[in-house]
């Protein structure tokens, strides 16, 4: 296992730093909805980084070890990421994520390029959730995100009155991913995957209810114009996208000027379903990026 250290920002966001603890060059990976940073542990342990790089893995506020009972959303997460970058004195980085985390990474780059364009040198989108490509219940919920806000506001009000779960268990997604892959092999299907990762009631065991609804709402919010994204971008899509149509996603993202797209045999959880393919593609792309910007 690659060595890491644990930290918190002033706002309370928990994150891990893998690799060179003094590095000012980083790969930042954000997890998806109802997930946490342990989703990336398998990748962090095996990924061959360019020299002098580190990996920063946050538990986004409201998730994992960054439990939060107040309002959360893209604004709070963007502030937390900027604070983490400042705390580590990061001068150059690539940022990416899965699902909600991919959308957040895209938002971060759009903002950062308008303020500090020199430090962000790449974007990695693993199964991003584009509004025009949504499938399933996400497509239905897209027009109901204000209802999600109203429900979460009622729950937050109850929290302030003392109505909330005092403790939440923490889920180790590194171990759960391993068990899930074994079950999928034994069953010869993806039922175990859906049973564990596509069930809101299962997710709510590990998240405060308001945080879950607000994070879901944030996933459904419109994205910034893609023409604002001028950095090199690596995209990994699931061929059997459970929540997003890969054809529509590819069509929308191909307007980006510097993009490489890979389509993997998966349903949605690429870090779980295709960890070695993900590692190999990302590793090669990072080393090419390092040679380009050095």
Image (cartoon, rainbow, N blue to C red):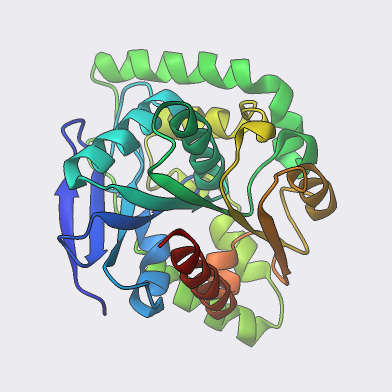
- Nearer-the-camera pick, 237 or 242: 237
With 250 as the anchor, is 209 left or right in this view?
left
Residue in the picture at 37% in, 35% down: 208
Observer-nearest of 229 and 208: 229
The number of numbered discs placed on residues in the rendered structure image is 0
Q: x and y percent of residue 185 in the render? A: 63, 85
Residue lying furthest bottom? 186
For the point 30% across and 27% down, the residue is 69
Is residue 238 among the parts visible in the rendering?
A: yes
**Residue 146's x, y, as percent?**
61, 15
Residue at image point 31% right, 73% down = 51
In-front residue for pair 150/134: 134
Where residue 120 appears, as percent x and y from the top left, is 43, 45
Above or below, 170 against 86 in this view is: below
Quadrant of residue 159 within the rendered picture: top left
Rendered view: 170 above or below 177: above
> If the image is split into quadrants, where does the N terminus sit?
bottom left
Question: Residue 154 vs residue 54: left or right?
Answer: right
Choose top left, top right, bottom left or bottom right for residue 76: top left
Residue beneath the point at 20% across and 73% down = 3
Position of 227 relative to 99 (above/below): above
Q: The C terminus appears in which quarter of the rendering?
A: bottom left
Percent position (x, y) of residue 23? 21, 60
Residue 76 falls left or right of residue 180: left
Res. 13 in view: no
């Amino acid at each position: 296992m690659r060595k890491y250290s644990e930290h918190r920002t002033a706002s309370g966001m928990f994150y891990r730093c893998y690799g060179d603890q003094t590095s000012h060059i980083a790969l930042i990976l954000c997890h998806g909805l109802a997930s946490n940073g342990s989703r990336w542990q398998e990748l962090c342990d095996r990924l061959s980084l360019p020299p002098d790089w580190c990996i920063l893995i946050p538990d986004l506020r409201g998730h994992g070890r960054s439990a939060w009972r107040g309002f959360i959303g893209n604004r709070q997460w963007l502030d937390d990421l900027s604070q983490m970058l400042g705390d580590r004195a990061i001068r150059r980085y690539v940022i990416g994520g899965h699902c909600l985390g991919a959308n957040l990474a895209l938002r971060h780059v759009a903002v950062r390029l308008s303020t500090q364009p020199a430090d962000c040198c790449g974007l990695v989108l693993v199964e991003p959730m584009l509004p025009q490509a949504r499938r399933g219940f996400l497509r239905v919920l897209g027009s109901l995100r204000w209802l999600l806000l109203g429900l979460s506001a009622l729950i937050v009000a109850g929290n302030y009155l003392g109505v909330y779960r005092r403790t939440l268990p923490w889920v180790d997604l590194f171990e759960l991913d391993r068990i899930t892959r074994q079950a999928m092999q034994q069953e010869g299907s993806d039922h175990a995957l859906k049973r564990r990762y596509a069930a809101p009631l299962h997710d709510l065991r590990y998240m405060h209810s308001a945080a879950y609804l607000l994070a879901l709402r944030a996933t459904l919010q419109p994205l910034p114009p893609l023409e604002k994204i001028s950095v090199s971008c690596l995209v990994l899509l699931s061929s059997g996208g459970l929540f997003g149509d890969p054809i529509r996603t590819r069509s929308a993202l191909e307007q980006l000027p510097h993009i490489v797209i890979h389509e993997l045999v998966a349903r949605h959880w690429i870090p779980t379903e295709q960890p070695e393919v993900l590692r190999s593609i990302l590793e090669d792309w990072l080393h090419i990026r390092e040679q380009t910007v050095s």
